[in-house]
Amino acid sequence: MIRAFVFLFLAHLALVIAALADCLGGEHHPRRLTRAWWVVIILFVPVAGGVLWFSAGRARPPRPRPGTGRSGSTGGPRSPKGPVAPDDDPDFLRDIDRRLRDENKED
């Protein structure tokens, strides 16, 4: 019986720590209430505080715009916004080919 209470206490402690860390460490503003109110709720409402935070208070990540996600149905290849790997960059490959031809002409 004591093992069950220890397990439940540790599970509750893990839930509280996870909820507090998520509440205080998030970059987006929480829904419905301020962070201070969510901290009070998480700490003083034993199990429901953490459950409420994860179900009602946590900010949802921004939704991708239609047609820009991986599951978007644009039908064609997307142009990358960030840096391109060298073996995928046609200009880089063209430059290497030109350098190799120039080196072979010199020999």
Image (spheres, rainbow, N blue to C red):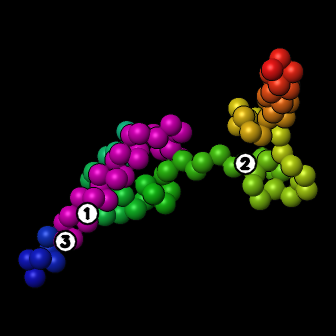
Q: What is the magenta range?
A: 7-35
Give the residue at mark 3. Answer: 7
Find numbered disc 3 in the image and state the secondary structure of the residue it sits on. Answer: helix
Residue 18, given in percent of the width and then of the height, sits at: 34, 53
Residue 13, given in percent of the width and then of the height, sits at: 23, 58
Residue 38, given in percent of the width and then of the height, sits at: 39, 46
Give the CA distance from mark 1 to mark 3: 9 Å
- Identify the amino acid type marked 2: Pro
Q: Main SS of the magenta segment?
A: helix
Compare residues 107 and 95 and report the one nearer the observer. Answer: 107
- Identify the amino acid type marked 3: Phe
Compare residues 56 and 64 and report the one nearer the observer. Answer: 64
**Marks 1 and 3, the one that precedes in the sequence:** 3
Up-down relation of residue 55 to residue 35 (above or below): below
Give the residue at mark 2. Answer: 64
Compare residues 100 and 4 and report the one nearer the observer. Answer: 100
Give the residue at mark 1. Answer: 12
Tell whether label 3 touches label 2 (CB within 8 Å).
Answer: no
64 relative position to 9: left or right: right
106 relative position to 51: left or right: right
**Marks 2 and 1, the one that precedes in the sequence:** 1
3 within the magenta span = no
3 relative position to 24: left or right: left
Up-down relation of residue 103 to residue 15 (above or below): above
